[in-house]
Image (spheres, coloured by chain):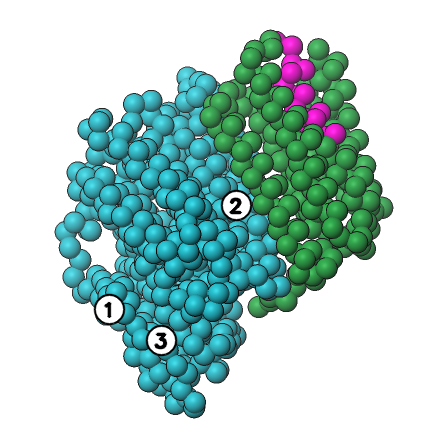
Chain colours: A green, B cyan
Amino acid sequence: MTAYLDIILVALILSDFILLGSGRLGNCIRIAAWQGIMVGLLPMATADAGLSFRIAALGMAVVALKGFVFPRLLNRAIRESAGSREVKPFVGYTTSLLAGVLALSASFWLDGRLSFPLQLESAIVVPVSLSMMFTGLFLVVARRTAVNQVIGYLVLENGIYALSLAIVRDVPFLVELGVLMDMFVAVFVMGIAIYRINMEFDHMDSNRLAKLRG
Amino acid sequence: MIPFALLLPLLSGLPVLLSLACLAGRSPAGILRLCAVGTAGVSLLFAFPVAVVLAGGEPLVTPGNWIRLDALSALHLMVLCIVYSLGALHSPGYFADEVRKNTLDTAAARRYGGLWFGSLSAMLVVLLSNNMGVMWVGIEATTLLTAFLICVHVTPASLEAMWKYLLMCSVGVAMAFTGTLLLSASTGPTAIHGNESLLWTSLMASAGGLNVTLVKAGFIFMVIGYGTKAGLAPMHNWLPDAHSQAPAPVSAIFSGFLLNASLYCILRTLPIVEAATGGHGWGREILIVAGLLSILTAAAFIVVQRDLKRLLAYSSLEHMGIISLGAGLGGAGAFAAMFHMLSHSLGKSTAFLSAGRIIKAYGTNDMRRLTGTLAASPLWGVGLLSSILGLIGTAPFAIFLSEFMIVRAAVGSGEWVTAALFLLGMCIVFAGALRFLLPMVWKPCDPKPVFPKATVLEHFIVILPLSALLLLGLIMPDFLIKAFASAAAVLDGAR
């Protein structure tokens, strides 16, 4: 099964780069959804653990939330707004892609420095999850549109989820449920917030949210 | 003690029910009254377990070790109850004119009440949980539940503050989760397995065997993550915006407890890190540096501040820095930090609540136009004057004493530079705040703004915390000495 695992991990990296180079909001939401589905499948692609009910149930919940519920919430939030493109990001797309390459190599370097007790068989789980976290942070900082910042947050969370699969022996069920619920509420609240900001500013450029200073 | 400990989860369910009751409320005034009575009631009920733990010193633990109340969390729980009660008791009066003018309609009041009790129960989850993962879930839930409390009045500025708060704190708290995972992964070499790898008690019990590199990495992530929400510099950018845009009772709970709750998570992790790294003060140094940085950043912004609520927000940043510095010094410093936490929350909530009323009557946040408050309204003027005097460390108030104790702790442990930088920060804050405070209180104002007549209850809830702040500076009851000492002992590694 390690082959499947590696395929998923490589696909995760590719989805990061598509997000870094893409400006259409609808497109970004779709890619983030695919990334969520792949992350949800990650625990099921491990061989040794066997497919216990718990792993399957949690995996399905993650796939359902990240792959279907979140994109729906985000799509509803942007439907009202006129523009469906990122408006002039703080960092251009080519530079973003370069930053992605940098993040990936930094992750591999960092992985060599830290000794993690690995749970999954693939050697590249940790660097991939670290690079997803970096990419997520980068998107939050480098994009102007509120929706794209939320997508950055989702990529960050996906990275953390993959990291938790790789390094933690057993996250208690209650904690995992709590984390999932928090994520759901987070995206829900952010969706409403974007909608409200739309109503007030008639376009959700979070850069206009810059009145409060000092 | 076991049956008594089981009361804790039952009591924590109460705010959830009250939250649902608020959602079903019919009139805005009724919902706000329910908030006041409900919060005060819940606080009185929690006084029992808090008193038992703080007086007896023994932690309350439920079977299965998921819920645990020790001296550190009991002290925080006490502060939580005081701050929420003060805020809730102020709400009916604060929103009275909006209810009359119908700018706060039933839907908005329902949302306010529901989120108020919702955030209260999330804070309880943080304090009562022995599981670091559940504690994280609680902190993230408080972020989400309090976000819409900032924009009770929907304006572009309040939406901006809300978005900044939501995004910065969510990303920050996600970092803290990574830290929690790293901490859990550090149990690799020990015999801890499964569910236990996130329990604070089992991490403490086998701290010596943890993987040191992962513990250190985890703590750094947690300080950055929880520090973002606790408002430690340089991750504090959201703080002045959110505090200045929120309605006064919400600002009071933000400054009085939301920041403390997040700092509590760092303080909770500190003894594990210290025990795992051999007690050489690796973790403490980080807190000292973060604390000093926050104090000096806050001091710089307080000097140039023109907006009253932002001034108070930066003062919160300063005080979070002081608590973190005290905890970092350990020993007498940790005692002072716990004392400081209680006094700061008392003073800051009163300051925000009084400032809220004054700002409402004057219609501006600008301190240059807020003059002669004492003559315009003796009650709120006295509230603002004495709470700010207390907060900047004027002599007989409790905060002066705790700051003095921190300086002594720093000098006692030979940290001369720390003590000097701390004193420098205090002096800048004192001078900077006083410059505006004096005209704000005494310079005559024309025409005099009209304040609604203050009720007996309102006199009571302004005078009471202020006299407590004053008395604590003069005499400290044995009960509190014991409480602070046992909470400080937890920080120093007692179990």
1 vs 2, front mark: 1
Residue marked by disc 3: B452
At 56% from the left and 39% from the top, the residue drawn is: A185
What stretch of residues is rendered in magenta?
A: A34-48
How many residues crowd mark 3 within 10 Å: few (<14), some (14–19), many (20+)? Answer: few
Residue marked by disc 2: B144
Can you see residue B176?
yes
Q: Secondary structure at mark 3?
A: loop
At 35% from the left and 75% from the top, the residue drawn is: B452
Residue marked by disc 1: B456
Q: Is residue B272 above or below residue B452?
A: above
Residue B100: image x %, image y %?
Answer: 43, 68
Cα separation between marks 3 and 1: 13 Å
Do badges 3 and 1 share one subunit?
Answer: yes
Mark 2 vs 3, N-terminal side:
2
At 58% from the left and 18% from the top, the residue drawn is: A57
Do badges 2 and 3 share one subunit?
Answer: yes
Residue B14: image x %, image y %?
Answer: 33, 39
How many numbered dots are placed on residues in this image? Answer: 3
In-image side of A86 versus A181 (left or right): right
Residue A192: image x %, image y %?
Answer: 62, 48
Do badges 1 and 2 share one subunit?
Answer: yes
The quarter in which the N terminus of chain B is drawn is top left
